[in-house]
Amino acid sequence: MSQSLIAFDTDHIKRYVFGTSKLKEIRGASSILDRLNRIETVQKAESDDFKATKIYAHGGSALFLIDSGKAESLGKAVQKLYHDATRGGASITYAIQPLPDDAPPLPDLMTATTLNADIRMSDVLKMLRIRLRLAKDGQHPHYSQDELQSQKDDLRQDNLADVIALPSHPLLCTCKSCGVNYAEVIVKDPDDTGEPDSRYCRVCKKKRDEDEAVKGSIPGLIRAAQEHKLSNETLWGRILQALSEKDASHRSHYALPVGTDRPEDFNVFRQFAHGKDYLGLIYADANNMGKIFASLPTLQEVHDTAMRVDNAVFDAMAEAVRLHFPVRGDTFPFDILLIGGDDIVIVTPADKALQVAWTLTDKFYEYTDKQHTLSTGVVLAPVKYPFNQSLILVEQTLKAAKKSGTISNGNASSEQEQSRINFMVITGNTSLNYDKIYAGMHRKNGYGKDNEFYATMRPYTSSQLNELLQKLKKGNELRLGRTKLHQLREAILKLDNTRSILLALALLRNWRETERTFIKDMVQELDVRQTKKQQQMGTLFPWFLDGKESSDDHILYRTPLLDFVELYDFVSF
């Protein structure tokens, strides 16, 4: 019997989940996709109609082994499943790769590196990834030229639909939430004090219905967790299951009082704020997973790696929550917006966001047996700030973190140091682009020499951020004056080695001896000069000389102090 591998990949996950800025619909969309991916797709594939063997299914992707004659039917059945469950809001792409007729049967197939004398399993998996990529791009390797042109025309029309407005009519109105699709139903929502009766499209209505269903199930899930009978067949069932398990240090379980619920909306995070009404949006994503999966030679290793990474994401999330977010009153002081596979999006109170980011990064490395790393972006934004804009900024922040980790990959002293944690704080004058913000903290100048000044150390390695967090804790204990910190910030932003140094040294004299020592030590601990010539240079405060990046004709200065000042009011312990 001929066998094939069939791979699935959900299309535009973030566009569907974050299609609106309302917390209810974000959570509902995330729950729908998780159930479709982990549960319903697997049930469909393993049913008597198809009898497929699961390799993995989570994070929006799946891989099955199936009878070649049933593969195409399974692909179309899963696509219909997604269309019906999301009311057309989400879709999934599949690709099929036949195996040689003389390939070994299960279970030997799982560990086989070669399928016959000419074909290796790694080549089959590579071809499957190519087919899936072509399918997602609207092409198919078996189509004729006319069929390919038809596919491209359809794809072009789909793209036009994203940018051209719907036809207008006096008797038609668009959905209150997404503002794109036509409204079809009127929903009475007593929790929405502004507009309790609103019109929604069928896609957003489905998301809201899902969120209400999850809300109604949480009391039962909590009771099941207390009785150690919790199932992980729903997203929040799996989240609570991870939270209720003992951590790596065998500490007590996370307290789950019956009656505890998720935040109703983003405004609830005001009650968790310490001082400023800010929240933290965290986006974490594993590094180099595409290359890692491309290097795996057997199906068993694909299965083991996928399971290890997915479990580590949930375990790292649970550890971060246990450490930083005990239940407050009757509300979880956090919310999981997207989790599974190799990434996680979580919203938290701003004062704990950096600690959560560090814990996620550190524990993910630990829970993957030190085989994989995670990079994380954090945006600290006012509660009233538009969520969609925060999401754009956190994606840019994460992208910069991953890029920095890739550049420094060869020079890292350990695998974990390839991880990067990046952040930005949104204030009244903040640009809406991370690259522009970063460029404003960088300057080149000099006469005869190429001097560069970076008023930041972002993105941070895991160990560097841990050191910064410890300094912030000590700084809060010393109660450093905010006026002096602001003056230090202004001195650093001169971005040169004359005014910055003179102003900063003059400012140091206004601090008490313990404060002055603390501030100077923060810079000196990072000042590692590589050559004797560099070591002979005099004081550089508030800068330290980056000896690794500097040379005789190129000198690079950095400082952690601006990051310290920027986070001083936002991090609490």
Image (tube, grey):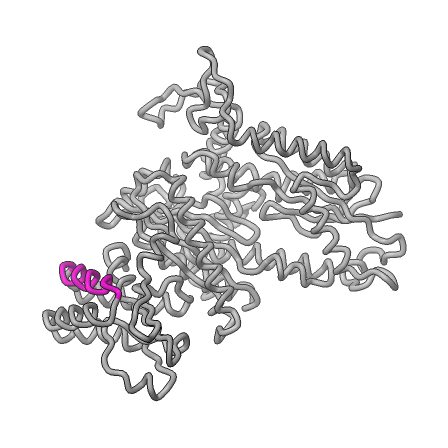
Magenta-span inclusion, residue 276: no
Residue 572, picture quadrant: bottom left
Q: Residue at x 45, y 54 (%)?
A: 398
Q: Position of residue 144 (x, y in %)?
A: 80, 37
**Depth order, front residue of 503/317:** 503
Point out the residue furthest to the front here.
Answer: 448
Q: Is residue 469 above or below residue 551?
A: above
Q: Position of residue 347 (x, y in %)?
A: 39, 47
- 215 with respect to 487 (left or right): right
Q: Position of residue 42 (x, y in %)?
A: 68, 43
| Span shown in magenta | 482-495
Magenta-span inclusion, residue 494: yes
- 535 with respect to 241 (left or right): left
Point out the residue furthest to the left here.
Answer: 510
Q: Please identify the quadrant where the C terminus is shown.
A: bottom left
Q: Residue at x 47, y 38 (%)?
A: 18
